[in-house]
Amino acid sequence: MRSCPKLHADSHVGFAWLRTIGALLIVLDHCWALLVSGRSTIFPPSWQIAPGYVALMGLFAMSGYQIQHSWARDPSWWRFGARRLLRILPPLVLVAAVTTFVVGPLVTEWPQGAYWSHPQTWRYFVGTSLVMLLQHRLPGVFDSNPFPYSANGSLWTLPMELLGYGLVLLLGVFLALGASRLVLLLLLAAIVYADTTLQADFLSQGKAASVLSIPLGSAASFLVPFVLGMVLHAFRDRIPLRPSIAAGLFVLWLALSQTSWDRYTLPVMAAYGSVTLAAHWPLRWGGAGDFVFGNYGISIWGFLVQQLIVLAGVREPWLLVVFSLPAAYLAGQLSWRFVEKPTLRLRKHLRPKRAVAPVPEPATLTPVAEPLSVPLSSGRDVA
């Protein structure tokens, strides 16, 4: 019997491609946000569409799907938390250290003594490394740039990402206590209600204040696609992933993008579209290897690299695109190959121990009329 030929690449490769493309789209949008006052995207404000914002919606949706999958594979709260921190913290602590202790003293406009003695220098390193106390300013750093408000502005979504991880853990606890997976739909409804009330978008963080370093309005907006990703995974036996439906949702979003319905169609399109596209990623693009696994490094290094290029004198957005996209991609590759991959190997110590079947007591041999046919054991435990 001939096996069916494989039509698509593994979904984890599709997710890696989409995450890298999304991270680069965010870097692209930042070329205008860093140089043009009143602009936050490559498109004119009248279009009310930002590729980077759409990409962020997709990235949060993919995180929701993949993190829910991680929990489903090993529903241990402490191993889950350890894996998440092992993924997030080592690259982040490195970028915080390089920004504070290398870039800062080299480019600050303050005297060196004043830079090192100012409490904000140390608040930046410690707070950024802790994620939830994220800081944006360093004394005298990038003060003459057109966008002096943050040394590394792209880190602002990380606290919201951690909040999403907490939702996965909370849901897992409820399910372990016997709750139906339908509770996930209640969670989605609550977050959609919060998003509708707080009214954040790509130009504004909405009506709510921030708690720690989490802008609550933006958190509600990004957690909608995150939870949608969780829903797509939890109900994957009921929700088909069809490219035709994804294409239809994309057309619907475009048609409604200039209306108030954009708030609802965008996260649905981004979530369903990204997960479906990852599941149907072309087989011929499935062998790129490490070259598509640097999205996190692009995200945490890209903005800092762009600020340095602007400091060097670049003031034209398209010229910043030419310099910063390759530089951000290279930074992502270096982060993946020399920081993330080595630290992720430590996950082998977090694997759940397999239960070893007890060795049966030797049976007493009983004479039989004829020999029994006994299948040979493979010698391996059943997973």
Image: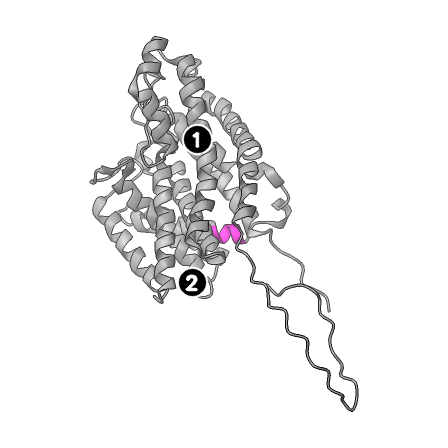
Query: Which mark is on residue 235?
Result: 2
Q: Residue at x 35, y 39 (%)?
A: 159
Residue 278 forms part of the magenta stretch: yes
Query: Which mark is on residue 240?
Result: none
Q: Nearer the viewer, residue 248 or 104?
A: 104
Q: Residue at x 43, y 44 (%)?
A: 59
Residue type at mark 1?
Val
Give the vertical position of 123 relative to 362 (above or below): above
The CA distance from mark 2 to mark 1 is 36 Å
Give the vertical position of 48 relative to 319 (above or below): below
Q: Residue at x 55, y 49 (%)?
A: 12
In primary-sequence order, the first of circles 2 and 1 is 1
Of circles 2 and 1, the one toward us is 1
Q: Main secondary structure of the magenta part?
A: helix
Residue type at mark 2?
Phe
Query: Which mark is on residue 93?
Result: 1
The mark total stands at 2
Q: Nearer the viewer, residue 248 or 335?
A: 335
Secondary structure state at the residue bearing disc 2: loop
x and y percentages locating residue 322 in the rendered image: 50, 24
Q: Residue at x 73, y 69 (%)?
A: 1
Residue 295 forms part of the magenta stretch: no
Give the vertical position of 126 relative to 382 (above or below): above
Secondary structure state at the residue bearing disc 1: helix
x and y percentages locating residue 236 in the rendered image: 46, 62
x and y percentages locating residue 15 in the rendered image: 51, 46
Kindly tell me whether residue 306 is visible in this rendering.
no
Q: Residue furthest top?
A: 111
Region rendered in magenta: 275-279
| Label 1 Cα crowd, 10 Å radius (few <14 / some 14-19 / many 20+) | some
